[in-house]
Image (tube, helix red, strand yellow):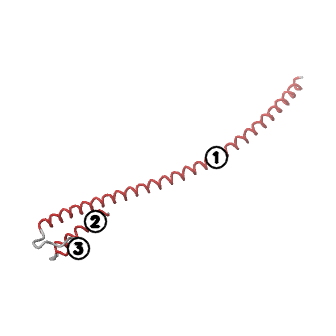
Amino acid sequence: ELGLSGVRQAVQVLRDYYASGSAAALVQQPALPEKHSKAAGAGSSIIGILEVCESDFATNLAKEEQEEADAQEEYEKITQENKITKTNMEQDVTYKTKESKSLDKAIAELSSDRETTNTELSAVLEYYAKIKDRCIA
């Protein structure tokens, strides 16, 4: 942007110089010799070159700004997708942890029930064996 503004200022200064009738247009210049005259052809070619530079700077600046804006937009899009994915994964971890704890509790209860049932089965089989012995004897 600074280069573009510098070229624009240079073009404006040269246009003012070659457009004005007096040599005082450029204050920085020393006093002009008596036979000094403005070279209109050289001035227009220099201004033309600077205008081409200005055009190139403006075009390249616009392209760079557009590419930067596109890259920023893409970055923000990916960042948002990552946030959503992270949140989903954290929720999955939370739910799976709860499910795991629930399953561990169910396993403990079922193991306890199995032990109780096996104890009852052993008692019933033992009683059945005693009854069977009495019925046969």
From what the image shows, is residue 36 above or below residue 133?
below
Amino acid type at circle 1 is Glu
Q: Which residue is mark 2?
A: 6
Say what secondary structure mark 1 lies in: helix
Among the 4 quarters of the image, the one containing residue 13: bottom left
Q: Residue at horizontal 13%, vertical 72%? A: 33
Mark pair 2, 3: CA separation: 18 Å
Q: Earlier in the sequence, mark 1 or mark 2?
A: 2
Amino acid type at circle 3 is Val
- Between circles 1 and 2, the one closer to the viewer is 2
Q: Earlier in the sequence, mark 3 or mark 1?
A: 3
Whether residues under marks 2 and 3 lie with C-beta atoms below 8 angstroms apart, the answer is no
Would you say 39 lies left or right of 119 here? left
Whether residues under marks 3 and 1 lie with C-beta atoms below 8 angstroms apart, the answer is no
Q: Which residue is mark 3?
A: 27
Amino acid type at circle 2 is Gly
Say which of 131 and 21 sits in front: 21
The quadrant the N terminus occupies is: bottom left
Question: How far across and down, in percent of the image, does residue 89 sit?
Answer: 55, 49
Question: How far across and down, in percent of the image, does residue 104 sit?
Answer: 68, 42
| Residue 99: mark | 1
Q: Residue at horizontal 37%, vertical 57%? A: 70
- Between circles 3 and 1, the one closer to the viewer is 3
Say which of 20 and 67 sits in front: 20
From what the image shows, is residue 62 above or below residue 17?
above
Question: How far across and down, in percent of the image, does residue 6 sit?
Answer: 28, 65
